[in-house]
Image (tube, rainbow, N blue to C red):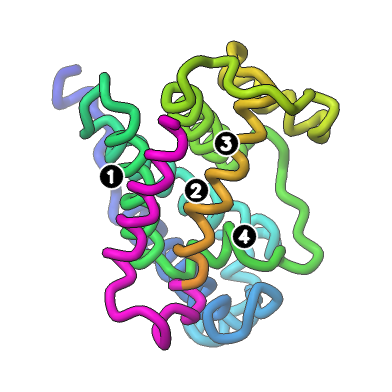
Amino acid sequence: MPATAQHRVTRRERLRAETTREIMAIALRQLATGGAGAISLRGIAREMGMTARAIYTYFPTRDDLITALTDEISTSLANSLERARDGAPADDPGARLIAWGVALREWALAHPDGFRLIYGDPVPGYQPPANGPTDQAARRVCGGLNRLVAALSGSANGPDGAEWSDFPPAYVAKVRAEAPELSPAVAALALRVWGRIHGLVTLEIYGHLRSVSNDPAALQRADLHDLVGQLHG
C-alpha cells in the first residue's frame, strides 16, 4: 500500500491510546492490591485526575474495562505459548510441551497481575461476553495443549476411560471446535496435564514456593520432563 494511502496516527489517537494503556495499568494495580473486586473506574479517574464522565468515554462500564484487560492479557498469553511451542522441533512433541510449560511460567512471572486476573478468583459481578478475543485465546491455549497431549500419548484417541458426557456441553463444543479429531479420553488427560503444569506456576505466583524451593525454574523443568516421560509411557 502506498505511504500516502496508509493511515497516519494522529496526536489525538496517540494520546487516547496512551490514556487507555494507563487506565488498564492502574486497573491491574487495583487488582494486585485489593483483589478482583477492587477494580473501579471512579477510583482510576481519581488517580489520573480525570472526571468520571471523561473516563467513561474510554470504558463506558467497569465490565468493558475488565473485558479489554482480559482480552489483551489472554491474547498475549496465547501468543507466548504458541511462539515457544513452535520454536521447538515439530517432530518432538515432548520438547514442544516442555517449551509450552516453561513459557507459561515465564509469562506468568512477567505478568503476575494478568495471570491472577485470568486464573485467579472471578471478578464479582462480571459476566464475560461470549466469542470475544478472550474466548478465542482460551480456545487456542486449550486446543494447543490438547493436541500436544494427543501427540505425546501416541494417537488422537489416547487411553480409554472417559466419555464426552463427563464434560459440560459448552466445554465439549469448544474442544471439538478446536480439535475435532480428539477423543474424550485425550481431553480428560489434557485436563490433568493442564492442572499439573498450572499447579506449580500458580503456587509460585501466589508466593507459596518461596519457603520450599530455592530454584522454582529447575523444579518446574524436572516436573515437565517427568510429565513427558509419563505421557510417552
Viewer-nearest of labels 3 and 2? 3
Q: CA distance from mark 4 to mark 3?
A: 28 Å
Q: In this figure, which residue is indicated by the disc labeled 4?
A: 66
Residue type indicated by callout 2: Ser
Q: Is residue 63 left or right of residue 32?
A: right
Q: CA distance from mark 1 to mark 4?
A: 26 Å
**Judging from the image, what secondary structure is the residue with disc 4 in?**
helix
**Judging from the image, what secondary structure is the residue with disc 3 in?**
helix
Residue type indicated by callout 4: Ile
Question: Decide: marks 2, 1 in contact (CB < 8 A)?
Answer: no
Q: Residue 101: percent from the left, percent from the top? A: 38, 48
The residue shown at (54%, 46%) is 194
**Judging from the image, what secondary structure is the residue with disc 2 in?**
helix
Q: Residue 74, labelled with which disc?
A: 2
Residue type indicated by callout 1: Val
Return the residue nearer the eye: 96 or 233. 233
User: Magenta segment, which residues?
Assistant: 204-233
Q: Is residue 61 left or right of residue 94?
A: right
Q: Residue 103: percent from the left, percent from the top? A: 32, 50
Q: Residue 155: percent from the left, percent from the top? A: 50, 15
Q: Residue 199: percent from the left, percent from the top? A: 53, 61
Sequence order check, earlier mark of 3 and 2: 2
Sequence order check, earlier mark of 2 and 4: 4
